Amino acid sequence: MLKEAPAGTWTGTNPRAGPLILLVDDNTAFIETLADRFEARGYRVITARDAIHAREAVRGHTVEVAVLDLTLPDTNGLELLSTIRARSPTTEVIILTGHGSVATAVKAMSRGAFSYVEKPCPFERLYVLVVRALARRSAKMEAAGPNDTLPWLAYEPASGHVTTSGPALGRLLADHLDRFSRLLPDPAERSRHLSALRLTGHAVSDVMRPDGRRLRVCSYGDESGARAIVLDVTAEHRHHAESDRLRRHFETLFENLPAGVAIINSDYVVTRANQAFARCYDLSPVEAIGRRCHDIIHGRATPCHSHGEVCPIKNSLATGATVRVLHRHRHADGVIRDIEATVAPLCDDSGTVVSFITILADFTAVKRTQAESEEKSRRLEELNRRLREQQEHQGRLAAELTRRNRELVQANTAKDEFLSTVSHELRTPLTAICESINLVADGTLGAVAERQARFLGLALGNTRRLGDTINNLLDASRLKAGRVECRPAPLDLAELTANVAAGFSAAARNKGIGIACHRAAESVPVFADPCQVRRAICNLVGNAVKFTDRGSVTLACRLRKDEALISVTDTGVGIPAEEQVKIFERFSQGREGRARPHGTGLGLPLARRLIELNGGRLWFESTEGTGSSFHLALPLDSPASRLAWLLGQRPPAPGRSWLLLIRADPGTGLSARLDDACRLAAEPRRTQDTPVTAVPGCHLTGSVSPVATQAVPLSPTLALLLTGNEEAACAACRRVREGIGGDDSTRPGLRLVPLSAGTDVADLLAALKEAPNA
Amino acid sequence: MPEAPLILIADDEADILVVTATRLEAAGYRTVTAADGREALDILRHQQPDLVLLDLRMPKVDGYEFCRTVKDDPNLDRVPVILFSASSSRAENLRDKCLALGADGYISKPFISTELLAAVEHALARPGGEPR
């Protein structure tokens, strides 16, 4: 507000407050600073930067004190002094002079100036002069007549008696003052005040009134008599307190700033430094003071600009503005850092730039972070690129894999088709050859001589061998691929055995050995895959005929407990003990170099695998040089074996009671489960169409021992004891209950279902459905 | 004395036709042969054989189609049909398929005469397969 106010006008905030002073100087910044300080102390101030404005001010106002610079743009100070003295005789004038202008000042004094002061001068000195000038003015005014404007008093320093006082004082104090001690109640301060007056002719004391105001008592005179003016300096005091507070805040801020801050003068000398600044260079703030910035920061004897670098101080001095530069600074730890230096000019009271506040911000970490972040994003980019490459590579691999897979599938299909074609093309002529020889050999087409018949027999036997070899090879390849499914059907094993034996009769006759088939029972019903069982038996008989040169091959089919048993016994070469362990291995066929017929070595492994697929067993005993017996056991066609098939399990061991455990899961009623089984059982042809798969929730165990029962991973809802042995049923029942465990409330329903060989599986399942828990 | 049963044999392999026919005739049956399925259907409609022996793989009309045609025709569906095939790749599947098609028997090649005669006898003994 001050700066914008036109010269020669009021700038004080309260026109009626304190004494009115006029400041005249052509240095605007200087007089504005002065005006600030006077106003802070309760004065009213008019500023003027030339004589014209000064004269106007004097004309329009009762200026009490004028402070004039002697050098003005439009006239010299002496002339202006004369003008002021002429126009306003009561105005006291104080002259400001430059260095070495004392003579002029003395001349001014002779023309009526109150005093002079040499520039630059401390404000306080000027202030005291102003106060004294005011006091002299008030004395003169008093002498000239009553003065109402200034609160003044006259007193006797020795007695402390107040002789007279102006009416303004009464207004200021709201009291009539008779003793000086009432103005300065503190004896120590009063004593100091009076002794200063005695020694110097003037004294100033501040006093706090009971109402909180602060008054300044300015006395002048001597021991015989003194005058004092009293000024209200409450605002000044408040201003001082505020300044103090601000200064303390600034000090705290300065010392504690994390950034290094220093005040450096125009000669590059550090005049103040905070902790952060000093720490950077391993100094204490005191140690930094007095050294030059280029010495501390760069370790150089001369300023930065002499090294061709930017010196922010020089630039700021030149422009008068704040300068910000990025510098590389070497710190005490030896690390070179990127520092942003902000340099702002600081002016003295006259507005001259005298020093610079320098703020150092460390950008090293920021720059490093920036560099690291760039490096990271570069690496990320690289990773991304590699990932993309890998994905593309994998995509190509996947495509390649898909292509190869397709090729493999095609190759497999082609192989299947090839095998099918080859087998068709081999079998068709074989059939024609076989039947042609048969028609001749059995005499259908006319009598055959014995010698002819022998050779026809040879041809027939070898043709059949060829057929068997083809079949074995194809079967082995299908077994290896796991593509053989078992499709059980009711089958009379006795009839099948007789048929096979009849089929080999010609071959046996040709070798000069006998072949016989003993049927112990009229019919031996099994539930097995007819093709597979036939192939297995053919392989056993074919082997027997092949390895027997004298004696005979005997087939026997009989019932043993719940099993069908077929034995193929020969009087052939037998199997050496050391080879017995591996005859069921694929392509194993005795040791080489032995004089014995050759084959693919597939027959026995294939036979065993096929029989096992049908829930049976194949084993043998053999003595080298005496002969071999191969035995084949299949479960009889019984409810147990059919149930086992339906449930996708192996038929239980024959001759034992067995247990069917069924768990009814939520959503899968026991009834529905058994319905499926019934339907399968009732339609044997459908059974053959449908691959045997495990029925979840059902388990058939061939043993009712507690251990076996507990091993079943099932919490059954219904347990069915199926037994053909009625006498043992009660004991079995008890064992099952023990095995399943639990008390009466949690024990599953246990039903005893008597079985016989003739029990129809469909009827059985229907009966199961009516179980209470179903 | 009733006439011997007439057996229709259909196969595109002429050699098979000759040996099969010779065997069946030696066993006392009358035979008639066809080189493909269509010819076999013709003969079936006009000569009313008592049994059909049919190769699965034949030109023009194969064994499956023959079976389906016979099954769909109420005048023909009582004639027993025995299928035979030299295809081994899925012998079990073929058997099931044939039986599912309503065939009365299945023989895989190479067959032996005893098997053939047993299957023929069995099929002719079937109630629906009696000579008309």
Image: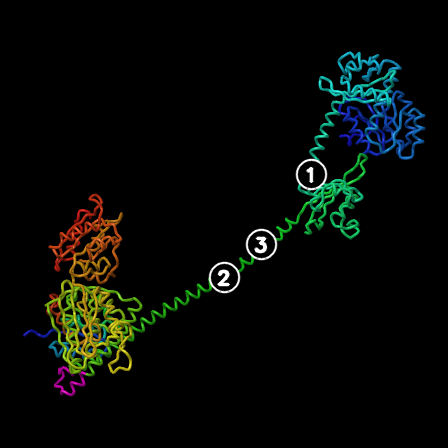
Say which of marks 3 and 2 sits in front: 3
- List x then y, in percent, for residue A621: 20, 72
Q: Give the range drawn in magenta.
A: A440-457
Going by the numbered disc 1, the residue's amino acid type is Glu
Say which residue appears at 24% left-offset and 60% top-offset. Answer: A692
- Are both tags, 2 and 1, on one chain? yes
- List x then y, in percent, for residue A97: 89, 32
In terms of secondary structure, where does tag 1 sit? helix
Q: Mark 3 points at which residue?
A: A376
Query: Residue A255: which disc?
Result: 1
Is A53 one of the magenta-colored residues?
no
Q: Quadrant of residue A698?
A: bottom left
- Are both tags, 3 and 2, on one chain? yes
Q: In which quarter of the image is the N terminus of chain A?
A: top right
Going by the numbered disc 2, the residue's amino acid type is Gln
**Looking at the image, residue A340 lies above or below residue A104:** below
Badge 1: chain ID: A
Badge 2: chain ID: A
Going by the numbered disc 3, the residue's amino acid type is Lys
Q: In which quarter of the image is residue A233?
A: top right
- List x then y, in percent, for residue A299: 75, 50
Of the image marks 1 and 3, the number of the one nearer the N terminus? 1
Q: Mark 2 points at which residue?
A: A390
In terms of secondary structure, where does tag 3 sit? helix
Pick the front one: A225 or A534 = A225
Furthest residue to the left? Answer: B1
Query: Residue A472: which disc?
Result: none
Q: Is residue A165 visible?
A: no
